[in-house]
Structures are given as structure tokens and as C-alpha cells.
Image (cartoon, rainbow, N blue to C red):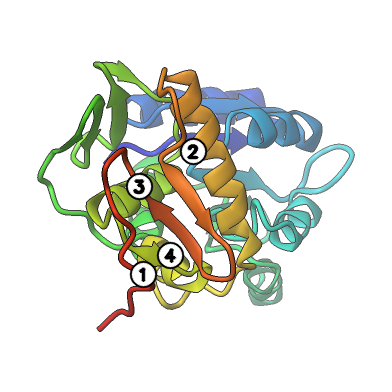
Amino acid sequence: MAAHVLVVDDEEPIRELLSVNLRNAGHPVDCACNVEQARDFVEHHPPDLVVLDWMMPGMSGIDYLRALRTRPATCELPVILLSARADERDRIAGLEAGADDYVVKPFSVRELIARIGVVLRRRTPLLADTQVQFGALALDPVGGCALIDGVPLALSQTEFRLLHFLVTHAGRVYSRTQLIEQVRGREFSGDERTVDVMVSRLRSALAAGGLQQCWIRTVRGSGYSFVAPGLTVTGLQAFD
């Protein structure tokens, strides 16, 4: 599945090298030369994974990583930290700050792309390959995209996974904890408010795509449910 990658590095040759090779590997790419630009991308064009340089002018990458881990909307965002610091203490510091992986410069581009795949597979359980159709809404797990009347929606990989799970379990109510376990796996320990942020983005994307009413319902005290016209909510669903 293609993943939207944000490359944050103050060295233009590295940004260009990664941008070309990641696109050739099938990943959409955005690039930022500092933390300020990275914040704008994360806010308005949420990536599925960030490749983040440690040392940059202004705020350092590791400080930005720590900041990402404190926000509900980004505490689960996969991050691979790049650094010229090869000392074991620095590697440990990067991982303890919240990095999913630590890559030392100079690095092999092929190895970095392989590490991106490993991080994404570790962070996200596999989806079935079967295409799902629900009225005007179509979900393609292989391509990782959602469409309304054939027009793709602007969703991150995580948002797509959440929508896919809700649609394929329509009419049932799931708690925030259960949704996190399904979208990220039981090892995910992020704030449950992350689900609220993702649901808000999904609702906005579905509305922008032309759905006349929101199909993702909030069930007070329980969680969320996907309910299309004529579909009945069956109550809280426990996992096996």
C-alpha cells in the first residue's frame, strides 16, 4: 500500500534524493526544509510517515519529534529519525524520544525505503484485499483509497483504515479503545482523543466528497458507528 511520506531535512540534496526514490517506489512525497514547514504540512496535509532529520536550523528534529508525541493528533504518527550521530547513546535518545526507527547518515536509500515498509507494516495490521462498495462510497484496500462516485477522497493511510473498519462493521458501535486496537494494533498506546480527530477529518472528507449527511455517528458514552440510511445500530460490539 502506498504511503504519503513527509521528508524533513535542511539539506536540499537529501530531500531531492529521497523525493525521487520514494516516488519511484510508489509513495507520494512532500518535503520540508525545517520544522516550521513540517508543521504546516502535518496540519494541512497529514502524512502517513515522517522521515525527520535530527539536526536542523531553529527547532531540532528530535525536539519536534517530542512535540509530535505530546499531541493527540500526531502521537501515533510513524517517524524515522535521520542523524549523523552514530553513537549508541544518541540512538537510544532518539528511540526514547519516540522514533519508530533510527537511521545513521550516510545511509542506503534502498535500506531506508525497506525500513519505511517495515515501520508501516509494524504500525498497521493488514487489510483484506476485497474492494468494498457502500452506496456511492467505494473503498479499495489494495490502492489504499476511498472514492465517492469515482472521485478519490483526500485521506491519510490511518484515516482510510479507520473508515474501512467502520464501513465493514457498519451498524455496530465501537469504543475509541477498540477502534485504536483495530487501526493501529493492540501495541498502540496513544491518547484516545486521536480517534476524535480522525473521525472529524473523515466527516469533513466525506462531506467534501458530496455525501449529503454524515454516516459516522457519535454514540454518547460508547464511541462511534457507521450508519447509512435504513441501517440499524446493534449496540456495543466486543472483540474476540
Dot 3: element: loop
Label 1, label 2: how many angstroms apart (C-alpha)?
Answer: 22 Å
Q: Where is residue 11 in the image (x, y as percent from the top left)?
A: 68, 30
Q: Where is residue 94 in the image (x, y as percent from the top left)?
A: 67, 66
**Front position in the image: 163 or 116:** 163
Which circle's residue, 3 or 2, is located before the other in the chain? 2
Q: What residue type is labelled 4?
A: Leu
Relative horizontal placement of residue 178, taking residue 143 as reference (left or right): right
Looking at the image, can residue 205 be seen? yes
Q: In this view, does 179 lie above or below 51?
A: below
Which circle's residue, 1 or 4, is located before the other in the chain? 4
Relative horizontal placement of residue 71, taking residue 154 as reference (left or right): right
Q: What residue type is labelled 3?
A: Val
Q: Name the residue under label 4.
A: 179
**Front position in the image: 236 or 209:** 236
Which callout, 1 or 4, points to the residue nearer the camera?
A: 1
Dot 4: element: helix
Quarter holding the C terminus is bottom left
Taking the view exactly as shown, the residue that stands out farthest to the left is: 130
In which image quadrant can residue 80 be found? bottom right
Give the numbered dot on residue 227: 3
Q: Mark 1 points at which residue?
A: 235
Which circle's residue, 1 or 3, is located before the other in the chain? 3
Q: Name the residue under label 2.
A: 202
Structural crowding at the residue carrying mark 4, measured as other residues with C-alpha within 10 Å and reported as few (<14), some (14–19) or many (≥20)? many
